[in-house]
Image (tube, rainbow, N blue to C red):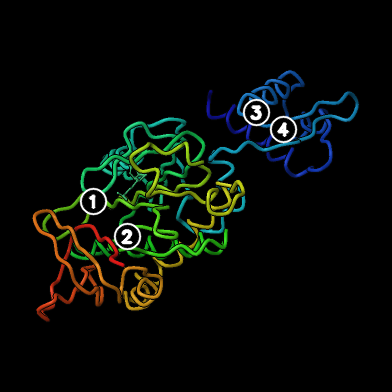
Amino acid sequence: MSRELVFLKMAVLRLLKEHRPGYVSGEELCKGLEVTRTAVWKHIQSLRGDGYDIEARPRAGYLLVGIPDRLYPEEIQDGLTTKFIGRQVFYNNSLASTNDLAKELASRETQISDGTIVVAEEQTGGRGRLGREWFSPKYRAICFSLILYPPVSPSEVSRVTMVTAVALAAAIRNETGVPVGIKWPNDLLVGGKKLCGILTELGAEIDKVNYLVVGAGVNVNQGPGDFPEEVRDIATSLKIETGVTVNRVKLLQAMLAEFERWYRVWLEHGFAEVLTKWREMSVSLHCPVCIHAIDKSWNGWAEDVDEDGALMIRLPDGELQRVVAGDVSLRV
Ligand code: BTN
């Protein structure tokens, strides 16, 4: 579809939304958009094909009855309160990994704008931390990647993951009331089960970040049967926790708004406020933990997290161990 046709189709949608819960006459659509009745009809059919429920009544016109549960760019933009995060959206019905496409876009010669988001209704090769797979079934989860150009050095990159964890946890708490907490390094958990994972990747030179891609997968409307057997006991979704289907567009808008807020707090006022919030939301501090790093494991007491996101654990012999990468299991 040409840019002009897409523009007209979106204009039809906008008028339908403006007149809700009333009808908009065919004549008004034709006049407003300076197109023929046949063209209006084609756009209505195309919107129906996208899942919009539109009633057509002789002499009354068209009524938008229902909006589909899809992460369409026009739905994300409708009501988005951010200045730059999510202002440009790359939407895909199915994609191997939103992080992969975001990295490809970010490394193109003509730069993609700061805060661009890549979303997919389904990932067929979703990636997690430490080379793991990330499973996201169609229309149930929110999978997105943000392209960012923060003026920071590669050593500060872990902070953006912490910013993301704080922002997403805050948005989820506000929108759904689910008491989500952060488990080091940056998993979001509810009742010990994983609700959301974050994967940050970067394009960089030794001392300069060219771009950052922050990918997040949130389990939203999955039922227990939607998770693969191997993670069924350790993963959860907002629907499982609340018993209700969550509006994915609204939640994504809230996450983008919170992200922009915390990202700006970091860049404009420094990292201290983010770190304080991260500590406050943590469920893996001030408790006994087992850390599994690549080649080693430790049992100890999780004492704190530092400005670079490293976990400080007090070992049984009293020594303080700094851990930069790995997984935590909480010991009870
Ligand atoms: C983890 O907890 O291991 C991180 C999971 C990150 C998953 C997200 S989903 C969107 C983005 N695209 C990917 O391939 N991975 C991230």
Callout 2: SS: loop
Label 2 to label 3, Cα distance in Å?
39 Å
**Residue at image mark 2:** 186
Which label's residue is closer to the chain start, 2 or 3?
Answer: 3
Nearer the observer: mark 4 or 3; the answer is: 3
* Residue shown at 37% from the left, 50% from the top: 234
The label on residue 132 is: none
Residue nearest the observer in this picture, 309 or 297: 297
**Residue at image mark 4:** 33
Please rate how many residues cluster around mark 3, counting C-alpha atoms within 10 Å: few if below 14, some from 14 to 19, many from 20. some
Q: Is residue 90 left or right of residue 127?
A: right
Callout 1: SS: strand
**Residue at image mark 3:** 47
Q: The residue under label 1 is which amino acid type?
A: Leu
Residue 126 falls in which quadrant of the image?
top left
Which label's residue is closer to the chain start, 4 or 2?
Answer: 4
Callout 4: SS: helix
Label 1 to label 2, Cα distance in Å?
17 Å
